[in-house]
Amino acid sequence: MTEDKQKMSLTKRVLLGMFAGIATGFIIRTFFSDISFVNDYIVHGIFDVGGAIFVASLKMLVVPLIFVSLVCGTSSLKDITTLGRLGGKTVAIYLATTAIAITLAIFTANIFQPGVGADLSAASSFQSSDAPSLGSVIINMFPTNPINSMAQGNTLQIIVFAVLFGIAVSSAGKAGVRIASFFADLNEVIMKLVVMLMNIAPYGVFFLMAKLFTEIGLEAIGNLLGYFLVLSGTLVLHGFVTYGVFFKVFTGLNPLIFLKKMETAITFAFSTASSSATIPVTLETATKHMGVKNKIASFTVPLGATVNMDGTAIMQGVATVFIAQAFNIDLTLGDYAAVILTATLASVGTAGVPGVGLIMLAMVLNQVGLPVEGIAMIMGVDRLLDMIRTAVNITGDSVVTCIVAKSEGEMDVDVFNDPKAGDKEEELHLHTLGGEYSQPDKADSSV
Ligand code: ASP
């Protein structure tokens, strides 16, 4: 059939969309930025609307996806002790990788000293907001009204409710079996929605990038080149080296295959700067491309997108040292220990949406008595760095997902090693509507 003709893989199309968007943005910014037609109708018209619709559709899937896949996952667990072990292991590894990330950040920032002699002129007007206490973060995980949690997109509350609901399903006898099979079907349908969305992603990513790169000037980086390079270098180092070593040591699998399979999710994270909006793609990548069973990924991926932010912690580490250097304030060893602890907590409390990491930085600065106005200095270059750190954040979620799955014997290594795994399912055949009944096969029937 002509359909079988060689098509570009989705990953390639999304990457192409990204690079074409970046190039288009640069060209418009350089040559056409004075033309009001281009600004009004193309940049703030087509690009803006197209990008916003794309991000909205991603977000649209997050709540139903987390709830349905997690109910499926939890209800298929054999016993409740598995859940406790899974939760403990996941949270422990998430915290460990974050603490390593921030320690690395403090080291590199001290070696390269990007803040020495930095220009303080921008450091005047930053309004810090109060960071929530750890106690209130924990209390806030428990929903009083799950519908409200869903309406507000409160991921942690949805996770708590879905886990409890799933446990109840698995212990409700015949009624539970019926509900579980309903949720398994619903999960297939929602994953199909994810696939539909991923197929428009190349355009969505193009619009987002084209608008962004028309608007952000790279001049801002000029003054903060040291900060930008140290931070992005540390992010890349953590993304490749720390994760590579962790992945290899704890799963025994090839980290290069892992990274290759992460390309699409990384591109999504990079262009949306939101771990939360990327959840559908991260989950799809983990289950369909890497062979992680849904019962693990449905728990670790949304949890990670909410509490595990290694990239954000790295930014907070480098930024703290940078600001201390710029204001000529010496940090003691005790201060560094406090930075590691608070930045780990701050990154847990950071929502997976653009720019929040910078706001949470105020909490870290307050802790060690540094001026929060320092945040104003680095704001100008934050968007680009936010994109990179979000990519690191979701890569960390996926590394831990694989480690936990492998250790639980819930990872299909053949799927992981198959370079084409999951590709077929990403092809959409809308013209065969209704004709694909036999499809929900190996998609991950073993939820
Ligand atoms: N944008 C980041 C994320 O979604 C959070 C942050 O660091 O601002 O993961």
Image (cartoon, rainbow, N blue to C red):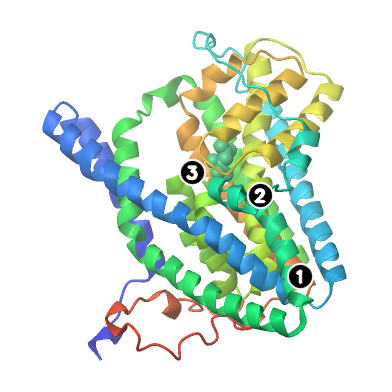
Quadrant for the N terminus in the image: bottom left
Q: Are marks 1 and 3 in contact (CB under 8 Å)?
A: no
Query: As rendered, which of 135 and 373 lies closer to the eye?
Result: 135
Q: From the viewer's perspective, is 264 left or right of 108? A: left
Residue that badge 1 annotates: 168
> How many angstroms separate mark 1 from mark 2 (CA)?
17 Å
The quarter of the displayed image where residue 100 is located: top right
Percent position of residue 373, x then y? 59, 13
275 versus 180 height, above or below: above
Percent position of residue 365, x then y? 70, 21
User: Closer to the camera: disc 1 or disc 3?
Assistant: 1
Query: Is residue 199 visible in this depiction of the protein?
Result: yes
The quarter of the displayed image where residue 170 is located: bottom right
Q: Is mark 3 within 8 Å of ligand 1?
A: yes
The quarter of the displayed image where residue 320 is located: top right
Residue that badge 3 annotates: 273
User: Closer to the camera: disc 3 or disc 2?
Assistant: 2
Quadrant for the C terminus in the image: bottom right
> How many angstroms separate mark 1 from mark 3 (CA)?
36 Å
Q: Quarter for ligand 1?
A: top right
Q: Amino acid at mark 3?
A: Ala
> How many angstroms separate mark 3 from mark 2 (CA)?
29 Å
- Residue at point 76% right, 35% down? 136
Q: Which mark is residue 145?
A: 2
Percent position of residue 326, x then y? 62, 13
